[in-house]
Image (spheres, rainbow, N blue to C red):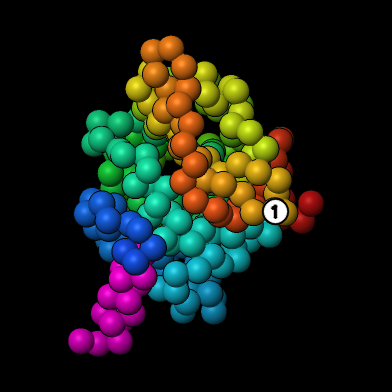
Amino acid sequence: MNRNDEQKMQFILSIRSNGVVDENVLNALETVNRKCFLKGLFAQRAYEDTPLPIECGQTISQPSVVGLMTQALNIKNRDKILEIGTGSGYQTAILSKLARRIYTIERFKPLYEEAREIFNKLNLSNVTSIWGDGSQGLMGQQPFDRIIVTAAAEDPPPTLLTQLKVGGIMVIPVGQSDEIQKLIRVERTETHFKYEDLCDVRFVPLLEGKEEDIYV
Ligand code: SAH
C-alpha cells in the first residue's frame, strides 16, 4: 500500500470511529478528494480529520463532522437540497454524490467564485452556486427536501424552516458563535417541527448580507 492509500485508509477509519456508519456517506467521503478544496501547504493536510483555514477567514469543516451532518440528513437520491455556507465547496461535493440537485449559497464572492470553478472542473453538474445571503433561504426553488447550514445561528432561521417540505430535514449548528454549539436536526411533520440534539460542534457564525471582497 502506498503512502496515499494509507493516509486515505486512516482518514476513513477516523471518520468511522467518530460515528459515521452510513455506507453511502462513507463512499462519498472516499470518492471526493478533499485536496481539491484546499490550497498550498494546507492541501498536504487534506487527509487529517480536522478543520483547516480557507480564504476570507473561513474554514473547511472537519471531515467527520461533514460525515455526521450528511448522515443526519438521511438523503434520498431524488432529493433537492439547499446548502447555506458553500465555503470551500467540500460539503457541497459530498452532497452532490448523494442527491439529485444541490443549491448552495455563499456570502463571500471570492469563495463563491472559487467553489464554482472547482464544481465545473469536477463535473458536478447537479450543483447550482449562488452568491448571496443564505439566511433568507432561496425563494423560487423552495420547498426543499433537505436543508443544511454550515455556519452557526443563534436559532434556526424561521425563513429557512418555512422552506422545508413536510417530511423534510434540516441540520444546523446553533449557539453563540464563540461558545460550544450544538448540532441539531429539525424534522418538519404535518403539524410541527421536531428537534433533536446531535453533538457539540464549532462553526463560524452565520452572518447577514453578502461581501464582495476578501478584506472586510
Ligand atoms: N461546508 C463548508 C464550511 C465553510 S465555513 C466547507 O467545508 O468548506 C461556513 C461558510 O458559511 C463560510 O464560507 C461563510 O462565509 C458562510 N456563511 C456565513 N453566513 C452566511 C450566509 N448568511 N449566507 C451564505 N453563506 C454564509
How many residues crowd around disc 1 within 10 Å: few (fewer than 14), some, or many (20 or more)? Answer: few
Classify 112 as above or below 49. above
Classify 177 as above or below 18. above
**Farthest residue in the bottom direction?**
2
Can residue 114 be seen by looking at this rendering?
A: no
Q: Name the residue under label 1.
A: 179
Classify 162 as above or below 22. above
Element under disc 1: loop
Q: Which amino acid does label 1 sit on?
A: Glu
Q: Nearer the viewer, residue 143 or 14?
A: 14
The residue segment tinted magenta is: 1-15
| Image side of residue 182 versus residue 5, left or right | right
Instruction: Count all numbered tags in the image, as a single digit.
Output: 1
Q: Nearer the viewer, residue 161 or 115?
A: 161
Q: Answer whether residue 24 is magenta in the image.
A: no
The image quarter containing residue 41 is bottom right
**Farthest residue in the right direction?**
216
Q: Where is residue 71 in the image (x, y as percent from the top left)?
A: 34, 47
Q: Position of residue 43 (x, y in %)?
A: 48, 74
Identified at 60% across, 55% down, the residue is 202
Identified at 25% across, 31% down, the residue is 78
Identified at 56% across, 54% down, the residue is 201
| Image side of residue 87 versus residue 94, left or right | right
Q: Which of 60 and 192 is in front in this view?
A: 192
Q: Where is residue 93 in the image (x, y as percent from the top left)?
A: 38, 51
Q: Answer whether residue 2 is magenta in the image.
A: yes
| Image side of residue 31 versus residue 59, left or right | left
**Magenta stretch, main secondary structure class:** helix
Identified at 49% across, 51% down, the residue is 199
| Image side of residue 18 versus residue 107, left or right | left
